[in-house]
Image: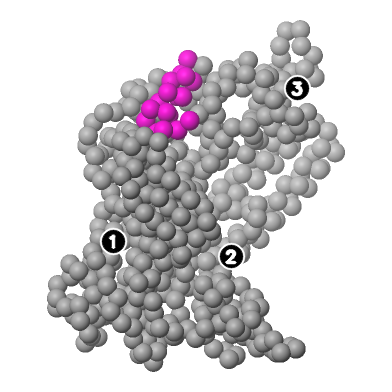
């Protein structure tokens, strides 16, 4: 059995047997799980041949799940293969229809790896809406959880109202008198625990947190304690996003020019991904008048679920499931790959012209850079993904637009699994389509590589400026011992940052097959 591909019933995943050992009558295998990239030991009784017959009733749901999840993942990864280009999530999940200039600002802000922008439109053009859209976009992409807004006292309550009205976001308003109360509420605040850790979304007035140099009647120690409680603890509280509004009264827009953004099929893809995933993996999904009743494979139950913000507005007391939900985002980004020896299903797909027949596949092209590290110093993505569909006719011709059309059709048309190919045929088709993907996906990988190299160049420039500014600040420290200690720490961090940066230059390309099918002409073999 060594060096053979098997199916682990414990992990519900293909695996490769590395070693087989029998001890006291028990046969145990050490296997490699490619989807987890891990080596584990399992009893041989838990392994089945990889080419075991397909369960057609589950295979259709598995295909539906993977095809919809890859659509969602393509949106999350910022892929632009779709005909409408880069997809923005925030306009779909907000109660405001943004104007064209606000959409442009949102697209610019989220197009880079780091969001650091000055929104400087004229008064009344909706900078609050732009900031809210950026925050919502980052939350939906899983990049932001804790948000701080610093605004003039006269505008702080307006920020709370607009975030609630336009984006359904609950922010906690903290004014000057509230800070002392927060410190008393946090038991460990005297031991270094920050009172700002109580809330994840906070709006504070600028005057209440602004540090002071001196105050009549106060000693330097009291001024220092005041600054620590108001300013230093605030800025070191681990915020993912900080928004500063210094001057103007800002308003939203009511123009309908961007209504098309709210009709994007992403909520449908999320619904199809979730429902098909549950059916394929032992869960249950039942649609009722009030929404979906979902039973997850681990036994958790979610009641009255909807996937569109519009449905959530029209149906009170429902649970909105969108990309802020970690479970749904995990379904989209942790897609299992298939192996060469797995049987390829023969399917029919309604809505396709009866003359279309051949072999269709969906691949993930991945760029892995360096090794992800906890608390890493560099600020660029180390994994980048894109998705490509390929189609090869029975005669061997390649039709990439047809491949994309089939992928789109899988989101709405009826799929039937008719049979499966023989193991030898499946292996041959797997290798053929893998070669097609390698040829057709080269341009896509080159674009990923260019994105990564540009990100490294920006990170190198950012780091050089940051460490230089830090050293200038250290030189202003009064005591030589303090300067020595801080310089030493700065040198250690810069050396670690440069090691991580050099590691990130090492690129590992990967092609991960997600789906392979044979499209039958007219729905028959």
* Among the 4 quarters of the image, the one containing residue 386: bottom left
User: Residue 122 is drawn in which quadrant?
Assistant: top left
Q: Position of residue 143 (x, y in %)?
A: 50, 47
User: What residue lies at 75% left-to-right and 22% top-to-bottom?
Assistant: 225
Residue lying at 58% horizontally and 80% vertically, measured from the top left: 46
Residue identified by numbered label 3: 225
Identify whether 157 is placed above or below 263.
Answer: above
Q: CA distance from mark 2 to mark 3?
A: 42 Å
Q: Quadrant of residue 446?
A: bottom left
- Residue 275 horizontal/vertical position (percent): 38, 58
Q: Which residue is mark 2?
A: 370
The answer to whether one can see residue 440 in this image is no
Neighbours of disc 1 within 10 Å: few (<14), some (14-19), many (20+):
some
Q: Position of residue 107 (x, y in %)?
A: 36, 44
* In this rendering, position of residue 383 left or right of residue 346: right
- Residue denoted by label 1: 411
Q: What is the crowding at mark 3: few (fewer than 14 residues within 10 Å), some, or many (at least 20)?
A: few
Q: Main secondary structure of the magenta part?
A: helix
Query: CA gap, disc 3 to disc 1?
Result: 59 Å
Q: Residue at x 60, y 60 (%)?
A: 372
Q: Nearer the viewer, mark 3 or mark 1?
A: 1
Q: Of helix, strand and loop, which one carries label 1?
A: loop
Nearer-N-terminus badge (2/3): 3
The magenta region covers: 154-170
């Amino acid at each position: 059995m060594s060096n053979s591909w098997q199916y682990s019933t414990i992990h519900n995943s293909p695996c490769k047997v590395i070693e087989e050992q029998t001890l006291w009558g028990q046969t145990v295998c050490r296997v490699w799980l490619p989807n987890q990239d891990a080596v584990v030991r399992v009893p041989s009784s838990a392994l089945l041949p990889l080419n075991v017959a397909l369960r057609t009733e589950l295979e259709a749901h598995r295909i539906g799940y993977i095809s919809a999840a890859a659509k969602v993942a393509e949106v999350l990864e910022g892929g632009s293969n779709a005909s409408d280009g880069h997809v923005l999530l925030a306009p779909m999940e907000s109660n405001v229809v943004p104007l064209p200039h606000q959409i442009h600002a949102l697209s610019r802000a989220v197009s880079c790896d780091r969001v650091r922008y000055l929104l400087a439109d004229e008064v009344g053009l909706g900078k609050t809406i732009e900031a809210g859209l950026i925050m919502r976009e980052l939350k939906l992409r899983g990049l932001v959880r804790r948000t701080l807004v610093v605004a003039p006292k006269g505008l702080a309550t307006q920020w709370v109202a607009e975030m609630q009205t336009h984006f359904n976001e609950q922010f906690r308003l903290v004014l000057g008198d509230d800070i002392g109360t927060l410190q008393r509420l946090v038991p460990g605040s005297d031991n270094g625990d920050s009172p700002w850790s109580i809330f994840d979304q906070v709006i504070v007035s600028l005057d209440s947190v602004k540090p002071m140099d001196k105050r009549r009647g106060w000693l330097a120690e009291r001024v220092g304690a005041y600054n620590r409680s108001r300013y230093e603890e605030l800025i070191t509280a681990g915020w993912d996003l900080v928004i500063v509004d210094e001057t103007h009264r800002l308003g939203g827009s009511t123009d309908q020019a961007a209504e098309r953004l709210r009709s994007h099929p992403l909520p449908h893809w999320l619904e199809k991904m979730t429902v098909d995933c549950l059916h394929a993996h032992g869960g249950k999904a039942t649609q009722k008048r009030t929404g979906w009743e979902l039973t997850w494979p681990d036994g958790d139950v979610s009641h009255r679920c909807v996937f569109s913000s519009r449905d959530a507005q029209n149906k009170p007391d429902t649970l909105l499931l969108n990309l802020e939900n970690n479970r749904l985002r995990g379904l989209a980004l942790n897609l299992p790959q298939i192996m060469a020896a797995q049987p390829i299903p023969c399917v029919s797909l309604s809505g396709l012209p009866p003359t279309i027949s051949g072999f269709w596949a969906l691949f993930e092209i991945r760029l892995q850079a360096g090794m992800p590290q906890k608390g890493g110093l560099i600020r660029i993505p180390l994994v980048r993904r894109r998705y490509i569909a390929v189609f090869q006719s029975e005669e061997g011709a390649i039709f990439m637009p047809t491949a994309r059309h089939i992928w789109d059709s899988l989101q709405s048309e009826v799929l039937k699994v008719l049979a499966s190919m023989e193991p030898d045929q499946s292996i041959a088709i797997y290798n053929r389509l893998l070669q097609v993907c390698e040829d057709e996906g080269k341009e896509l990988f080159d674009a990923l590589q260019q994105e990564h190299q540009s990100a490294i160049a920006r990170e190198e420039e950012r780091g050089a400026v940051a460490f230089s500014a830090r050293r200038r600040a250290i030189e202003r420290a009064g005591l030589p011992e303090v300067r020595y200690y801080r310089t030493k720490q700065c040198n250690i961090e810069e050396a670690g940052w440069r090691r991580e940066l050099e590691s990130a230059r090492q690129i590992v390309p990967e092609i991960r097959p997600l789906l392979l099918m044979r499209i039958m002409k007219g729905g028959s073999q």
